Image (cartoon, rainbow, N blue to C red):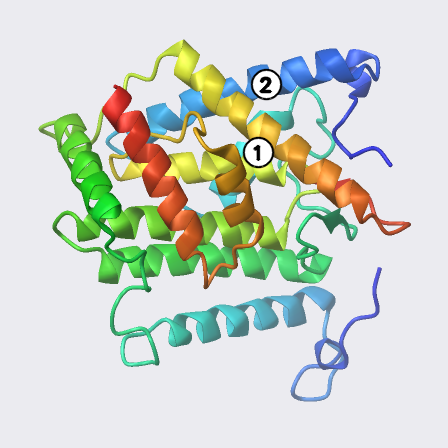
Amino acid sequence: MPGAFDASAEFGYDPLPTAEEIQHSGQNVLRWLEAIATSETPWAVDVRLIQEIHFRWFETTFPADAGRFRTQMVLNRKGSAAEVEAILPAVQSACENWTWRRERFRPSDDPELIKFIVAEANTLAIRVYDVHPFIDGNTRATWHLRNYLLMLDGIRPLIDLADPSSYEHAWWSAASDNHAQVDSVVLNELALQERSD
Amino acid sequence: MAELPERWKTLESGAPAPYWVAAVDEARRDINLALEDAKPGRAGNDDPREYPRNMPQDRDNLKVLAAGRRSRLQSNGRPRFDLTDAEIERSTQTAMRLADASKSQAEARAAAGKPLSA
């Protein structure tokens, strides 16, 4: 069974140019997120931001679904997708919780601050992925969402994965309240990147 | 569309509730409960979450990341990254690969009638 975003009508239902265009759009998303994360007035972390990230990823390939929460049930790898009626409150709650914790618990000093930034970014990315608000493209949207959360607090985005299998194993088995393994893997990957710069 | 839960069909007064009134109430309740759960003093919330244990390797990583972060902060308090086109491309490619892996695994356990989603 094909995935929802495999072949776009805008590209003659051909998977290859569709994937190339999605890749191109995804690059523009990250460039845009870098610009707003470093600006004097970064975007707030809320439902609008998440919808905008998804919209920009898929507006040229799947315009009818880009940035819109799904209206039907889907099957995702973790089998975690929320009921349609629960999507908006769940995503809103996840964003507000991230903001609330950042305002109250954010340590002022390293190295606790670094751990906090990475762990809280993972929490929100996992929560949004698990709700699975969009018909497709949730992995890609939450990847750049986490990159935005990292950049917002001065950490470079995740670029490559030196150990993709460790990352995947940690990511697919993570829960929003239990993701120490993802935190550790992401910290390791980010530090590898930092050392190579 | 799935049948609405019974509690969404009427207001407390017993009058029929428009769908959106009940949905907004429900969302507010969920948010308030989540915020309540996250308050200091509730179990496990006095301190930030349990973060990765401080293994020697983690301590080194944290030091490296902290130094990098400090070097990127500008006088206005905002960071600066200057990501290269190649870095932007590679990060996006990584996301694309993860999405493919996600979908192929979901396919293996696909149930009829539900679109696969990554």
Percent position (x, y) of residue B103?
Answer: 72, 37
Q: CA distance from mark 2 to mark 1?
A: 10 Å
Chain at numbered mark 1: A
Report crowding for label 2: few under 14, some 14 to 19, many 20 or more residues within 10 A (C-alpha): many
Question: Can you say whether A73 is above or below B47 in the image?
Answer: above
Q: Is residue B84 visible?
A: yes
Query: At label 2, which amino acid type do we have?
Result: Gln
- Tag shown at residue A140: 1
Query: At label 1, which amino acid type do we have?
Result: Arg
Percent position (x, y) of residue B96?
Answer: 60, 27
Image-based side of A164 in relation to B8, left or right:
left
Percent position (x, y) of residue B62?
Answer: 21, 43
Quadrant of the rendered image containing residue A62: top right
Q: Quadrant of the N terminus of chain A?
A: top right
Are the residues under marks 2 and 1 on the same chain? yes
Chain at numbered mark 2: A
Question: Can you say whether B58 is above or below B52 in the image?
Answer: above
In the picture of the structure, the residue carrying the numbered disc 2 is A23
* Residue depicted at x 72% and y 17%: A18
Image-based side of A154 in relation to A11, left or right:
left
* Residue depicted at x 71% and y 35%: A65
Secondary element under disc 1, as helix, strand or loop, is helix
* Residue depicted at x 46% and y 38%: A145
